[in-house]
Structure formats: structure tokens, C-alpha cells
Amino acid sequence: MFARPAIDALLPLCQLPAGETGQVRELAGSAQFCQRVRELGFGESAVVTKIGGRGPFLCAVNGNRIALNHDAAKNIIVEPLVRRA
């Protein structure tokens, strides 16, 4: 189960620490880019876990593992989620 952090801090997926989970809040970039990442499962409100990498970034979303380059990951804006104890 996840809880929202005390401070609403949005950041690009590329800045989310490895092993952390975030909820997609906004997609930046061209309409074509936004449509493509939505098709991959990174739609607004999707929960994504950054598994690792420094580019390409390996992410888990909707039960799938997907690698994103830095340009794609910087255009996916997430709200970090914290795991409840």
C-alpha cells in the first residue's frame, strides 16, 4: 500500500531514485510522444516503479518492464509515493 508524501513534489521520472515508486501526474513533449507513452502504459495516474539504470531507465508499469531513454524519462512527470509501514 502506498501513501502520498507530506510534500507534493513532482519530478521527472529520470530523477526518481532507483527502487522507488511514483504516480504519473503529467506528460510533457509532443502530442505524438504523449500518445506513444500512454500506449506503453505511462498514462496519467499510472503507478510506475523505477527499477534502475542511468539511461536507459528500466521501469515497471502495469506488470510490464519497459526501458526508456533519458529524453523520454524526463518528459514523464511523477509524484513520488512512499510505502506505508
Image (cartoon, helix red, strand yellow):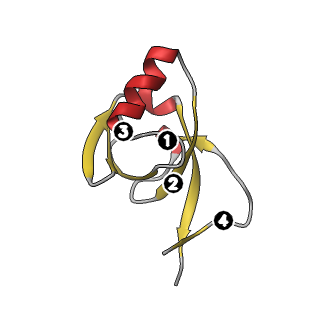
> Relative to residue 68, is residue 34 depicted above or below?
above
The Cα atoms of the two marked residues, 2 and 3, are separated by 17 Å
Look at the numbered disc 1 and give the secondary structure of its residue. helix
**Separation (CA) of disc 2 from disc 4:** 10 Å
| N-term-proximal mark, 2 vs 3 | 2
Farthest residue, direction bottom? 85
Residue type, label 4: Pro
Q: Which residue is mark 4?
A: 5
Q: Which residue is mark 2?
A: 22
Alpha-carbon span between mark 1 and mark 4: 16 Å
Label 2–label 1 contact, CB within 8 A: yes
Mark 1 → mark 3, Cα distance in angstroms: 11 Å
> On the image, numbered disc 1 is attached to which residue?
13
| Amino acid tagged 2 | Gly
What's the residue at 49%, 41% (across, down)? 13
Three-letter residue code for mark 3: Arg
Spatial CA distance of label 3 from label 4 is 24 Å
Which residue bears the numbered disc 3?
54
In the image, farthest residue toward the right: 7
Mark 1 near mark 3, Cβ–Cβ under 8 Å?
no
